[in-house]
Image (spheres, rainbow, N blue to C red):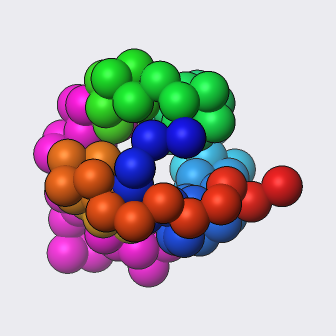
Amino acid sequence: MPNTNLDFLPVLEFLTDKVARKHGQEEPRWLEVRKVYLATVADLERDRLEEARQGVGRLKELTDGFTVSEDACPGRKALMTAFAGLEMSLNEGGVVQQLPQ
């Protein structure tokens, strides 16, 4: 497992699912965000830090730099904040936490 703080992954799991279900039909990029997020977690589980970083880079592209409009739903806003936290953790290499089973 890479040396990173992953204690917020359950929050990301919930938020990516929620946003994809709520907005995916009208904005298919949210379905892609969910898919890329799941692949990124799989990379983390396999100690593939560079691939996980690339996945976070793709998430950043799909979400316009983890930004949302002021009128975005609370789920999207929370998701962007959590993605930014994931990016920071992977770049800083914080303390390892167990991946949720």
Question: Residue 52 vs residue 1: left or right?
Answer: left
Where residue 96 sits in the image (x, y, percent)?
48, 60
Q: Left or right: 3 with respect to 6? A: left
Q: Nearer the viewer, residue 95 or 53?
A: 95
Residue at horizontal 45 percent and vertical 41 percent from the top: 2
Between 50 and 86, the residue placed more toward the observer is: 50
Q: Is residue 26 above or below residue 68?
A: above
62 in magenta: yes
Give x and y (percent) for residue 84. 26, 59
Task: Find out whether residue 78 is within the magenta segment.
Answer: yes
Q: Residue furthest right?
A: 101
Whether residue 22 appears in this view of the structure is no
81 vs 29, left or right, is left
Question: Which of the image's four quarters has the C terminus?
Answer: bottom right
x and y, in percent, of residue 31 in the image: 58, 33
Which is nearer the eye, 48 or 57? Answer: 48
Residue shown at 20%/47% (left/top)? 91
Residue numbers of the magenta segment: 57-81
Q: What residue is drawn where x is 55% and y is 41%?
A: 1
